[in-house]
Image: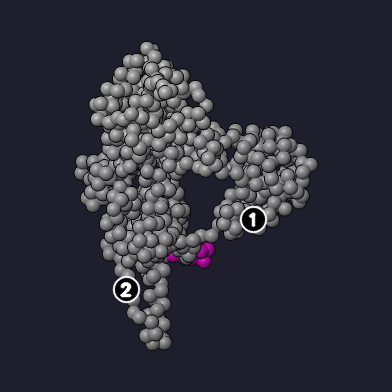
């Protein structure tokens, strides 16, 4: 009779590991004959388990299920670091329950609690996908993770994607979320913001396809702009110059310098190409603003390199202001009152509170969407006797401002503070300084795109037409104009540096246009009968000299115009006419008119209306001359 197979003996070098493994199984109340034999076989071959990690991945994955319990024990107790390639190919169903009882248990539990604290609902999934694998492979606690560890894990994910021929977005998202959790738990990580690949592209990459003869000059020009323009602005310029450069490469491949550019051969064909160009993604014609931007980018570059005295500059001007199309002067796209009310009710009832409250805050303050996401945690300032004010940080125009708040808006801010995720300060994407942002979720700043998508979802659920965040700003400004706010106050609230943008809202509802319409309508009724419904009359209460409009004293009364209309070309025209004559009997009238004009000068200067103040000064000078002549008669 042949003897049976002899049991494998564990070598002395691995005896302690084998003893600890059996104690681990007994502690958990599990184990069977295959578990024991699999462990003896593995330890007999690899008494030092880390040697097994040097095996090719295919051999690592060929191990039978009877060895898996031992591998879990070795990894959880710091005896084996198998490499991210093996860890990513392994299924960690049972190891999650084992991790809580292992030396990794405290960090594992701490990670899940930290993820929940900053707003992650699927903490277990993220912990198993990334955090546990990194604890095993690095052999360090959570607060010992560094950026290189995440880079190594990311590289392993890319290798697995290449092996399997498909992307793994859940791992990519889990890596980014794990990094946020670990950062807020105190790891020495740099809180770098998530950026598009465009931020890492060189200017040469932006200008791919541009002929070699002119590309260096364009690159040099973009590098000169870095000191005076935001990176995002230069990226737009680079993209537009690339369109021009690729056009030149197609129409004149022999062009070797920008100095050889010719209006007829190069610029005029490019203007035609821009006029007929279409968006690469939608196939729609380019907007007027994009066509204007492409032409102006080329003209600005050629003009500036000429001013700088570059040898690559053309000998004469090639692009003129009239080459760029005029932009349409569209009115602000405000929400009608009924839509505004329905949207506000929908946001109040929306389940995702922090995003809904952020949009309610924008509607209540008129902030730009970029200003909204940049708000800091200490943005509310209480001024004695003046109430609460919202400090709007540096934004689109690199200027700060203060916006007054009412009690309802303060309650919205309080709800945001209640629902925001806590944690360490984050790096500001533009200034680079560490900031405690007001709008944070899952350890990150809520993005502009997230709020846009959320607003679109709310409008869609409410059965409303598509709504954009900037329409909330337009609605805020339109409501203020309807309530009679002055131009200066509107400029301060909206953060406009010139009156041009604010006057767009003044064109919406012009009291003078309304009054003229009603006078014409009254006359039409007298002549033709009541063909239209009667409109209520417009009245001006109080002292006419103090009204926030453009004013002028006339012989038989006074003229009132809105700031949007500008000064009237016919105001006081008679006083300046060469045929105008006066006499001593009219001196009191002229003196009264002069006193009113002097008061209107002070009023216009206080409101910042320089042209209006100058008009009244010219009138005062003319009245002085007329009064001198009348007194001399």
- Up the image or down, 367 lies above or below 171; here it is below
Which x, y percent locates residue 383? 24, 41
Instruction: Say whether residue 326 is left or right of residue 36.
Output: right
The extreme left residue here reads 385
**Residue 108 painted magenta:** no
Q: Is residue 530 visible?
A: yes
Marks 2 and 1 sit apart, C-alpha to C-alpha, by 51 Å
Q: State yes or no: residue 580 in magenta.
A: yes
* Magenta stretch secondary structure, dominant: loop
The residue wearing badge 1 is 277
**Residue extending furthest toward the top:** 12
Instruction: Find numbered disc 1 in the image and state the secondary structure of the residue it sits on.
Output: loop
Q: Is residue 145 visible?
A: no
Residue 622 at what x, y percent from top left? 46, 57
569 relative to 84, above or below: below
**Region in magenta:** 577-582
């Amino acid at each position: 009779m042949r003897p049976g197979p002899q049991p494998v003996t564990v070598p002395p070098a691995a005896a302690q590991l084998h003893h600890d493994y059996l104690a681990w199984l007994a502690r958990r109340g599990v184990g069977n004959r295959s578990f024991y034999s699999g462990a003896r076989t593995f330890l007999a071959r690899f008494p030092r388990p880390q040697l097994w990690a040097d095996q090719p991945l295919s051999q690592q994955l060929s191990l039978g299920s009877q060895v898996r319990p031992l591998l879990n024990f070795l990894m959880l107790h710091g005896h084996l670091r198998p490499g991210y390639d093996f860890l990513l190919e392994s299924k960690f169903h049972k190891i999650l329950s084992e991790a809580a009882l292992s030396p990794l248990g405290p960090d594992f539990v701490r990670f899940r609690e930290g993820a929940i604290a900053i707003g992650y609902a699927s903490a277990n999934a993220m912990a198993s996908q990334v955090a546990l694998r990194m604890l095993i492979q690095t052999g360090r606690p959570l607060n010992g993770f560094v950026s290189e560890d995440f880079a190594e894990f990311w590289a392993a994910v890319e290798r697995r994607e290449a092996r399997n021929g498909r992307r793994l977005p859940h791992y990519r998202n889990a890596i980014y979320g794990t990094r946020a959790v670990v950062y807020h738990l105190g790891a020495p990580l740099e809180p770098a913001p998530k950026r598009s690949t465009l931020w890492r592209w060189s200017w040469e990459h932006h200008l791919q396809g541009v002929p070699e003869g002119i590309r260096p000059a364009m690159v040099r020009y973009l590098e000169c702009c870095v000191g005076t323009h935001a990176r995002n602005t230069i990226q737009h310029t680079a993209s537009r110059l690339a369109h021009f450069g690729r056009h030149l490469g197609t129409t004149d491949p022999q062009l070797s310098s920008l100095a050889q550019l010719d209006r007829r051969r190069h610029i005029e064909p490019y203007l035609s190409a821009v006029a007929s160009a279409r968006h690469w993604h939608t196939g729609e014609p380019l907007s007027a603003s994009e066509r204007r931007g492409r032409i102006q980018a080329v003209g600005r570059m050629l003009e500036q390199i000429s001013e700088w005295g570059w040898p690559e500059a053309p000998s004469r001007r090639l692009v003129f202001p009239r080459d760029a199309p005029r932009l349409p002067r569209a009115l602000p796209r405000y929400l009608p009152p009924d839509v505004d009310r329905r949207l506000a009710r929908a946001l109040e009832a929306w389940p995702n509170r922090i995003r809904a409250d952020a949009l309610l805050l924008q509607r209540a303050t008129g902030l730009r969407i970029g200003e909204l996401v940049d708000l800091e945690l200490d943005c509310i300032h209480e001024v004695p006797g003046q109430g609460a004010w919202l400090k709007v940080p540096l934004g689109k125009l690199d200027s700060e401002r203060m916006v007054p708040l009412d009690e309802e808006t303060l309650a919205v801010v309080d709800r945001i503070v209640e629902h925001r995720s806590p944690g360490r300060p984050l790096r500001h994407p533009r200034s680079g300084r560490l900031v405690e942002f007001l709008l944070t979720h899952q350890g990150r700043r809520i993005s502009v795109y997230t709020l846009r998508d959320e607003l679109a979802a709310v409008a869609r659920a409410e059965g409303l037409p598509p709504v954009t965040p900037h329409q909330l700003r337009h609605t805020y400004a339109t409501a203020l104009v309807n309530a009679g706010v002055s131009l200066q106050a509107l400029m301060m609230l909206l953060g406009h540096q010139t009156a041009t943008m604010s006057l767009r809202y003044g064109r919406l509802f012009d009291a003078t246009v309304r009054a003229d319409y009603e006078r014409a309508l009254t006359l039409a009724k007298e002549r033709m009968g009541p063909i239209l419904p009667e409109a209520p009359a417009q009245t001006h209460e109080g002292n006419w000299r103090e009204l926030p409009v453009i004013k002028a004293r006339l012989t038989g009364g006074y003229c009132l115009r809105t700031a949007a209309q500008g000064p009237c070309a016919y105001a006081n025209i008679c006083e300046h006419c060469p045929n105008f004559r006066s006499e001593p009997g009219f001196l009191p009238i002229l003196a009264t008119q002069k006193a009113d004009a002097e008061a209107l000068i002070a009023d216009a200067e206080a409101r910042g209306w320089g042209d209006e103040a100058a008009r009244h000064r010219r009138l005062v000078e003319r009245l002085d001359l007329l009064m001198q002549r009348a007194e001399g008669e």
